[in-house]
Image (cartoon, rainbow, N blue to C red):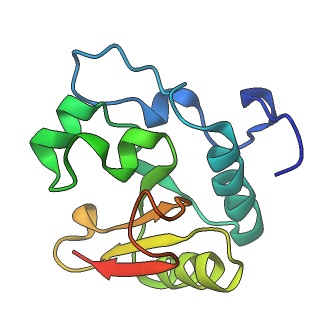
Amino acid sequence: MNRNWSWADVKYFEPGEFRCPCGVCGSDGYEMEIDFVIKLDQVRERLGIRMLVSSGYRCPSWNTQISTTGQAGPHTTGRAADIHVYGGDAHKLIQQAVLGGWFSGIGLQQKGEYRTRFIHLDDLTEPDHHPRPWIWTY
């Protein structure tokens, strides 16, 4: 992105939605890279759907406890979020993420109870993570 963004430019999200849930690290959500949050915000604007953050920033310790990606997983970078979405809204989000080229990593969890469904989005690049673009299921 070619602009110096700030949280004042974000319309649909608040920093607290992205805070690490560990309760120890002191995360407040400002660990998120603002360019990534702006992308989410712009996608939300285009789609006109509700986008609840089910997981944003994770400190390395918390990520090691809950993810196989360990201390350097995508959520530890501030450039990844899981969005609680399912059904038709999930389809719209996936379509925008892929066709719009907004995100390089897309993970899908769309089985089970509705409350546990989400789409992971990140904009990571090689060589730090898998070849990009990359899509997977949980």
Q: From what the image shows, is residue 100 above or below residue 65?
A: below
Residue 132 position in % (x across, y down): 51, 75
- Residue at x 26%, y 61% (from the top left corner): 115
Q: From what the image shows, is residue 110 above or below residue 125?
A: below
Residue 48 position in % (x across, y down): 70, 66
- Residue at x 48%, y 27% (from the top left corner): 29
- Residue at x 32%, y 80% (from the top left corner): 136
Q: Which is more toward the observer, 90 or 59?
A: 59
Q: Residue furthest right?
A: 3
- Residue at x 52%, y 59% (from the top left corner): 124
Q: Residue furthest left?
A: 65
Q: From what the image shows, is residue 5 above or below residue 110?
A: above
Residue 41 position in % (x across, y down): 69, 52
Q: Would residue 105 appear left or right of 54 to someone viewing this image?
A: right
Q: Which quadrant of the figure has residue 45?
A: bottom right
Q: Which is more toward the observer, 138 or 104?
A: 104
Position of the C terminus by quadrant: bottom left
Q: Which is more toward the observer, 111 or 4?
A: 4
